[in-house]
């Protein structure tokens, strides 16, 4: 068999950036191994032809994975890197990479970025950090001097599941207690409510030099949770915005001493300037890689893999398109009987990709987390408004026919 140059992926979703990364590794000529603890994935093995070897292992347990890696090495797999494009395994993958490969990224920085509380404390003296308060499990419940409304979140959670809004003292108590019940050992964070448009900034760092890959304006639908239901990729970033964002990105890269890596920031543009909502040490999931490809003509996950392999990534835009992604959620609960309109959406003006997640018989619910976004339509346009109009028109073609529960 010889020494197969191998990339190990820890965790992957069926679609989205983490899956795109496995396909990119295959395209770059590497043997791909996926460590998964997802039984359904393991049962649907045939749906993952780009995964050359799938290993069922407890990915929450480093020791178990170390044994699996040693087993691969015994069988002459030459493991070049171990990576994850999935929350919350980016740090785990980096630690394993420290042990078994040459790691070009910084595990300590990744660990800090994965912990929202640590990030806040570490960056508390910067103007872009919002006012916040940390409540330990036994602390009296208060919102300090944060005023109302106030945001309450668990520092460990991801994908907006545990981000709650309180408009009075009674709601603060209710939300804090519910998070303490769910995560009894953890702290709860309270942050000032920030008003203004929200942006996602995809960044890659090579040789300590950050490169802003793309800036997306986010559309937020606020029901019981804050769910992002739309993204507009800016084909050209206004120069003042570019300067401000580069300053913020540079201060974060310097503060965390990042030499090479990928991260995305969520920021709000408020009356008092840019405020950092959170940092994640990886590309955003979902359709992000496809959006960037439609906007600029390169695959960000492929260039990120090159970076992890110690090569120079090429993130020069081949063209610049305005791109809008419209996510589809449902307004009521029901069992999915069928989905119509996918072909019409695909043939709609400017549409480059349509994805529908649930199968027949799935219970659909109004969104409580990002996982409850059931389809998306990606479209391009000559302007931001045209791209958005194209995506919205395409999305209108898709109908979920449900038997209401």
Image: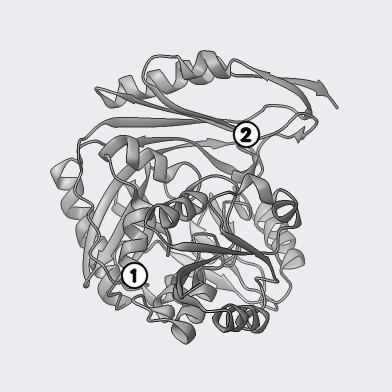
Q: Secondary structure at mark 1?
A: loop
Residue 9 in the image: state x and y as whole percent: 53, 65
Q: Residues within 10 Å of mark 1 (few under 14, many from 20)?
A: some
Q: Which residue is mark 1?
A: 309
Residue 349 spot, x, y in % from top left? 38, 14
* Residue pictured at 42% horizontal, 44% vertical: 288
Element under disc 2: loop
Say if 202 sits above or below 156 in the image. Answer: above
Between the C-alphas of marks 1 and 2, the distance is 34 Å
Give the residue pinned by disc 2.
Answer: 374
The mark closer to the camera, 1 or 2, is 1
| Residue visible at 27% across and 75% down in the picture | 259
Q: Earlier in the sequence, mark 1 or mark 2?
A: 1
- Mark 2, other Cα within 10 Å: few <14 / some 14–19 / many ≥20: some
Q: Is residue 303 left or right of residue 34?
A: left
* Residue farthest to the right, as pictured: 405
């Amino acid at each position: 068999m010889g020494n197969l140059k191998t990339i190990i992926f820890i965790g992957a979703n069926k679609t989205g950036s983490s899956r795109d990364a496995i396909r990119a590794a295959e395209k770059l000529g590497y043997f791909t191994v996926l460590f998964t603890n997802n039984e359904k994935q393991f049962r649907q093995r045939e749906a993952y032809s780009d995964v050359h070897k799938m290993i069922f292992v407890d990915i929450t347990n480093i020791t178990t994975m170390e044994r699996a890696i040693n087993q691969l090495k015994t069988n002459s797999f030459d493991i070049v890197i171990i990576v994850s494009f999935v929350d919350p395994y980016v740090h785990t993958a980096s630690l394993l990479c420290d042990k078994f490969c040459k790691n070009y990224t910084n595990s300590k920085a990744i660990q800090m970025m994965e912990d929202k509380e640590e990030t806040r404390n570490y960056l508390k003296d910067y103007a872009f950090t919002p006012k916040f308060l940390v409540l330990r499990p036994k602390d009296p419940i208060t919102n300090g001097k944060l005023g109302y409304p106030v945001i309450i979140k668990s520092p460990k959670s991801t994908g907006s599941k545990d981000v709650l809004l309180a408009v009075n003292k009674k709601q603060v108590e209710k939300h804090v207690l519910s998070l303490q019940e769910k995560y009894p050992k953890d702290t709860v964070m309270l942050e000032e409510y920030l008003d203004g448009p929200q942006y996602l900034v995809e960044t890659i760092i090579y040789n300590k030099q950050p490169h802003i890959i793309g800036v997306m304006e986010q559309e937020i639908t606020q029901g019981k949770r804050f769910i992002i239901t739309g993204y507009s990729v800016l084909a050209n970033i206004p120069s003042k915005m570019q300067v401000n964002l580069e300053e913020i990105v540079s201060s974060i890269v310097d503060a965390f001493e990042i030499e090479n890596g990928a991260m995305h920031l969520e920021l709000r543009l408020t009356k008092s300037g840019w405020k950092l909502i959170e940092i994640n040490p990886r590309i955003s999931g979902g359709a992000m890689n496809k959006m960037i490809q439609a906007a600029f003509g390169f695959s960000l996950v492929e260039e990120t893999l090159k970076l992890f392999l110690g090569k120079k990534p090429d993130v020069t835009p081949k063209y610049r398109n305005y791109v809008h992604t419209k996510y589809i959620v449902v307004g009521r609960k029901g069992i999915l009987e069928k989905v119509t309109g996918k072909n019409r959406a695909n043939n709609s003006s400017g549409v480059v990709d349509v994805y529908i997640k649930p199968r027949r018989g799935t219970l659909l619910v109004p969104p409580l987390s990002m996982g409850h976004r059931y389809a998306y339509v990606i479209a391009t346009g000559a302007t931001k408004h045209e791209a958005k109009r194209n995506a919205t028109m395409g999305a209108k073609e898709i109908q979920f026919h449900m038997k209401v529960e």
